Every structure is written in C-alpha cells, then in structure tokens.
Amino acid sequence: MAESYVDHPLLAPNVIEERQYQVSLAATAERANTLVCLPTGLGKTTVSLLVTAERLAGDAGGKSLLLAPTKPLVEQHADFYRMALEIPDDEIVVFTGEVRPDDRAELWESARVVIATPQVVENDLIGGRVSLRDVVHCTFDECHRATGDYAYTYIAERYLADAADPLVTGMSASPGGNEEDIQIVCENLGIEAVEVRTEHDEDVGDYTFDTDVEWERIDLPDDVVEVRDALNEVIRDRLEKLKDLGVTNSTSPEVSQKDLNEMRAQLQRLIDNDNSDGYSGMSVHAEVMKLRRAVELVETQSVESVRRYFERQRNAARSSGASKASQRLVSDPKVKQAMRIAENFDGLHPKFRRARMLLAETLGIEQGERVIVFTESRDTAEALTDFLGQHFETRRFVGQGDKEASEGMTQKEQKERLDEFKAGEFEVLVSTSVAEEGLDVPEVDLVLFFEPVPTAIRSVQRKGRTGRQAKGRVVVLMAEDTRDEAYFWISRRREKEMRDQLQDLKGIAEELEEDLDDGQEALDAFADADASGGDGGGERASAAAASDGGSAEAGESEGQAGLADFSAPEPDDVDADAGNGSESTEGGDGGEGGASEGDDGGESAVGEGSVARAEPPGEERVEVVVDQRELESSIARDLSKREGVNTRLETLEVGDYVLSDRVAVERKSVDDFLDTLLGGDRSLFEQAKALVRHYDRPVLVLEGGSVYEARNVHPNAIRGALSSLAVDYGISLMRSTGEEDTAELLLTIAQREQLKRDREVNAHGEKAAKTLDEQQEYVVSSIADIGPVTARSLLSHFGSVEAVMTADDEELQDVAGVGAVTAERVREVVGSDYAPE
C-alpha cells in the first residue's frame, strides 16, 4: 500500500507515517490519561509524539515532559523528537545527571519539550528547581516501572497535583504480569483509559511478521561437567553447615533461589537475636551464593567467564578487608581443583561453536545483514566479541557501570556504536541487557539468545528487535541438564502468561477502566467529605490550615491545640546561650557531617536555589533544606508534596535538615542511633559536636520503635548517651514512629520557626566563634558545587583561600574530588563580574 504521512502544524512533513492504529491510539490518549500497550517496535513513542504535538499546538505556553528509564533511551527519544517536531532544537532539551542542576533549572524555563531520566526530575522537584504547572503532557516510557518507590510514582503524583491541565500517557510493551500489577501501575500514574494492540489486531498486522523461536539444546563437554561437579560438591558441604544451624533441610546444589532467600532471612533473625551462629551462617551463605554464580557461569556461559570470575574472587581475597567468605572460597581444595581445570581448559564451550555456525548461516548462506547476540554476562559478551570477531565484523554493546571491574561504555560510545550498526559498518552486535529495553536497535535478521531469559518482559523486548519489517528468526541456546533448562521452562511459562495477559487485557480494558473510575470517584468522595466535614470538622481543619500555613492534623478537634499552636516563650524569656552546648564541646573540629560529594555530572543536587511551585497569592510558605543523602528516605518527597512547603537540596555540612537559621535536625533510625553509639565511621558525639557548633537549637529525631529492645545493648548505656546529648550538648531529643511522623515533626518545627518567629533559613548556620580553619573551610565550601570534604582537600592542596580562588581550571582538577565541571563552576563564580539583577 502507498505510504501517507501525518499532516500537523507541529510535525515535520513526510516524517511520521500515517498508521491507523497509531492515530487511533493517539486520539484516545488526547482525551484522557491513557495506558498504551503496544508490542516493541510498533511505535509507542510515535503515539506519544502525536499527543504531544496536539497538546503543544493547543497551548502556546505549555511544555511536554517525556520520561525514560535510561540515558541512551532519553537520547534516542530526543533525536526522534528533534527530527519529527517543527520546534527549534534548542527548545527540545535533555535532562540527565550529566547536566548540572543549575543549568537544568535555566533550561527548563525556555524548553518546550523536556526528555529526561526520572531520577533527575525527581531530584529537581524535591529541590524546587522546576515547576510542573505548565506541563500539558507527561509521558512515562516503560511505565511498568511505576511501582513502589520508583521515581515515576512520585513524579506522577506531583504532576497530577501541580499541573494546571495535566495529561498522562503511559507506554509499555509489557505492562505487568497480572491484572493486579497492571492496576497498580494505572493507579500510580492516574490512568483512566487502557488501550491495547497485539500483533493479531487487523490494523497492526500489516506492520508485523512472524517471529519464530527456536530452542537448541547443547551438550556440555566432560571438562565443563567436571568443573561444575567439583563446585557442586563444595556447595553441598556448605549447605550441610547451614543445615546444622537449622536454617535448611536440603543440601542439594539445585536448591532454589527462593529457599536461599529464606535461609538468609532465618540467619538475619539469628543475628537480630544476638546469636553468633547467625554471623557465621551468613558468611557460609555468602559462599554458597558465590559458588552458585560460578556454576551458572560454567554451565550456561563459558569457561572463560568462570575463569575471569575466579580471578576476581582471588583478587578480592587478597585485598585488605577481604571477607572470610572470599578467603575460604579460594582456599578450598575442591574450588582450587575446579579453578585448575578451568584454567587448563583450551577448548570452546559448545555454545560458542553453535553461535558461530548460526551466524555463518544467517550472514553467509542466507545473505543476511545484521545479527544481535544477547548474553547475561559481560565477561561472556567480551569473550564472544573476541571469538566471533575472528570470522565476522563484530562489536560489543555493554552498559556504563560495572561493579566487577570490566570495562564499560560511555553514553557517547553507546550512541556511536548503535549508529555504526544502523549504518552497516559491522554485522554482529554482542549485547548485554542494556539493549533490551526500548532502545532503537535496528532491524536484524537474527536475534540469538546465548541463554534463556527467565523474565518475560525482557524476553519480549529482545525479540522485538526482529520481525518488524520482514520475517525474523530468534534462536535460544540451552545447555542440557543445567539451569538453562529451568530458565527455559520459566521463560515458556511467563511468556505464555504475558501473551495471555495482553490478550486478556484487551478483553478487560473496559472493566479495568471502570475499576479505575470507581477508585477515582471513591477518592474524590473521600476528599469532598473530608473537606466539608459534616460535623463542622472541615471548617475547623480549614481554619487551622489557614493559621498554621499547613494542614490540620488528623484527630484534632474543638478544644484541642494544633501542632503549631502551643505558645512559645518570648525571646527575652529564653537564655541566649541555651542549646549551644557546654564548654566541653569547644575545640572539636566540627566534623564533616558525612558529606557525600558526587562525581561531576552526577545526579546530585548540591547548593542549588529554590524555584517555588505555583502557589495561590498570599499563601504563607516554609522552606526545608534537605541533605541530598536523605533522598534515600521518603521524607523529602513527602514534604515536597505538601501545600505551603518548598524543599531545597544541598550537601549539608552538618545535620540532615535545616529548618531555620538556628535549627538543624539530625535524623536517626533506632538502628542508626545504636550503630553510631557502638562505633563506625563517625561517632554519635562527633555529630553532636558539629551540630552545636553551627546551630543554636540543634535537634536529634530518633525514629522507630523502642531503642531499648532493638539490640542487645545495656539500657544504661543508651540512657547515658541520651542524657549526654541532652545535658552535655544541649541537643533536643524528639521521638518519631517512622518517616511520615518525622515529616510532620519537621514541618511543625519549620512552621513555628519561620511563620511564628519570622526566622530565615540558613543552611550554614549562624553560630559565631568559628576557628580560623573552620572559617576558611566555610568560605571555600560555599562556592558552587563544593562541599566540606572537597573544601578541605582544596585548602590542603593550595594552602590558603586566596590560592584556591586564583587557581586555574587545570590546577583545580589536580585535587581529588574536583572534576572539569566543578573546576569550571568555581572559575565562573570567582572570575565573573558581579551583576545583580
């Protein structure tokens, strides 16, 4: 059939092919928050693009936000949008951790389309750098991730609350394993409509071809079996030890991962009960996990991969601070025997030979052009690239980070590699899982799985690389009598479940939409009832909110004081020196506060100003400065969603939260409190000393259950520590039941300080009498992205504040922790003309 193209004022001519199913999906997505389920390679992003074009055309001042889980996927979407949209390229911007936070804030203001990783947007929202008010379309790519604490969930909640005219599109080829999972994703994203297409739909069928899956069984050679059996004997021995501890009844090397997880849980319970068997058992359990990984590698990957694995284990055992598990592992005679066999093995794993033969058939006999080989192991990817490269033009494609010290690829290298593959500069791409999810890997003639994939989502996405424009082929290599076979059956079952689920989803889409509508109506009714308050409670709540600048606490009623309503003493009634610690605290070094200074280009939010959300005129607001390390808890996210609250992220020198010029809060869970009390990187009292040096009203919030029951620590030791904090250091001690309760405490204190006492927020504190070196560190740490740790490094290197200020870019980068981005920022701050607006 003749191709036709979508005609739209904001779409480049002759770029977007007009496919009826995409146009139909976009029409639905323009009317309501929609989940779009479409097989990989059939243009989910095009559907979102059509919606974005329509929304931007209808709102000249609006923005579009597209979120994708990986940096390469973000870059791919940006290329597509710049090609397809009639919008200047500089108005289509990319937000990843490589873009400085202050640059992102500036770019946001001028952008019409922002394409970003979710963690960056989450940080920018919590840090108050961006507002979602003008975002008229928000797309969540690979939206099946919108569960639990993943950033999609928080961003969707903020977007639906903050945007003037929100519209959500969720996209996935595989939205979930069952109806309940899909409903959770829909509820988290505010989805109202569900649209599903499969390869069997009439309007989709013209654009797909059959993809056959062939399973090939591979026999293992005797040497490989010998290595495996030697390792399995050690596993049996270690499981016998765990059996003696009573945490397992099985000593079979084929024990399931579920059973291993249960063993670990039982060992943790022993540790929690201060039973020393738990610690020794946990070390043995760690050995079992390492050995099972080695068995999996030798069975399903390659002998080369297990050789490399053993080498890393040897290096780890020789390193300082090596675990006993690593040391015992490499010194065990049976393990040494397995290592010798592996090192002397000069043959090929039979999967390698079969892979070479399949490529020869596809690229030679059948005159194909491209092949992708997927493998789970980066070691195997490297070995395959070397081996196949002897016969074909082969390149590898792996991720950026690697905890096991294998060389990764930068984002730029990944993009260049894919561009070369698309251009036909080489024939074979050997890839780890990085190319599975959503990346626009070009059409190929064969997808070869070096091993079965037990996760249906990943398997479906991999197979989406073939069969788009012509009949494709998928081959899965499976080693006989190994974990490959277990994964084979798991994969078969899960893929069938997913196919059935997508088909079922088509049938229940209307029912699911009704359930979502009912849930929304219930929430609306609850909100209405809460607001109206049939007994007058609603009016009281409104009045309390108006007086406090925040919401009334649940459970307050007439005659009871609100959280911020207790009268505070007048300033003259309070000892000016109260809370600043005794003289015994003098002479301390102030401490580092455990500051974490991320790499240049990281996704931290250091020292950035606050860009307030849109707010009703005249509303009183409070600001909470949050240490960036506290993003691991839900507190900052919780506070950032509150009406009347601005949050700002910084690398704080001391404390976790700053609520005014005199109040800083150190938050500790009960376990954290006991950890610091018993020892660690930084003692509890060093942190206390730093707090009282910088703030007149330091606070420690102790979060969780009973501090006396959590560990086997004598109650008098705990009482002594608490007494010292209160009496010797003048720190106010407060208890909270959990993170939500802590957020309420912080908000209440901030309201009292900023609204009732009219105090400003100062992240550095205002206490005087700093020593000379503290003042020097303070000056340097206040510049740009510099934190206290790097400030000390700079001063130690250059010798004075003046020398730091006059150093050039290259000299600054000679200091540990200072990269090109930070050096450039320092020179910009120090050398630029002062030009206040």
Image (cartoon, rainbow, N blue to C red):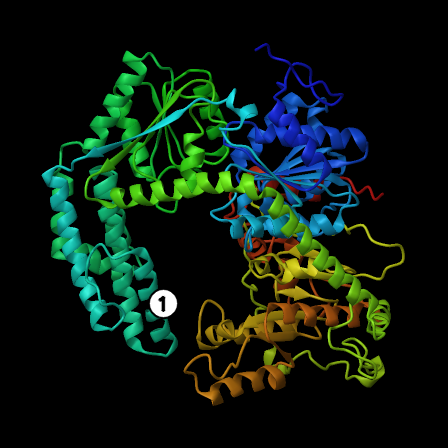
Residue 623 appears at what percent x and percent y?
75, 61
Q: Nearer the viewer, residue 714 or 272?
A: 272
Q: Nearer the viewer, residue 366 or 727?
A: 366
Rendered position, 486 above or below 761:
above
Q: Nearer the viewer, residue 532 or 435?
A: 532
Residue 782 appears at what percent x and percent y?
67, 54
Quarter of the image for the N terminus: give it: top right
Q: How many marks?
A: 1
Residue 608 appears at what percent x and percent y?
69, 50
Q: Secondary structure at mark 1?
A: helix
- For image coordinates 27% across by 54% down, the residue present is 290
Say which amino acid is labelled 1: Ala
Image quadrant in which you'd find residue 822: top right
Residue 101 visible, this angle: yes
Q: Nearer the viewer, residue 46 or 201?
A: 201
The answer to whether residue 492 is left or right of residue 546 is left
Residue for badge 1? 265
Image quadrant in which you'd find residue 701: bottom right
Residue 599 visible, this angle: no
Quarter of the image for the C terminus: give it: top right
Residue 481 appears at what percent x and percent y?
19, 43
Rendered position, 201 above or below 132:
above
Image quadrant in which you'd find residue 85: top right
The residue most toward the bottom is 716
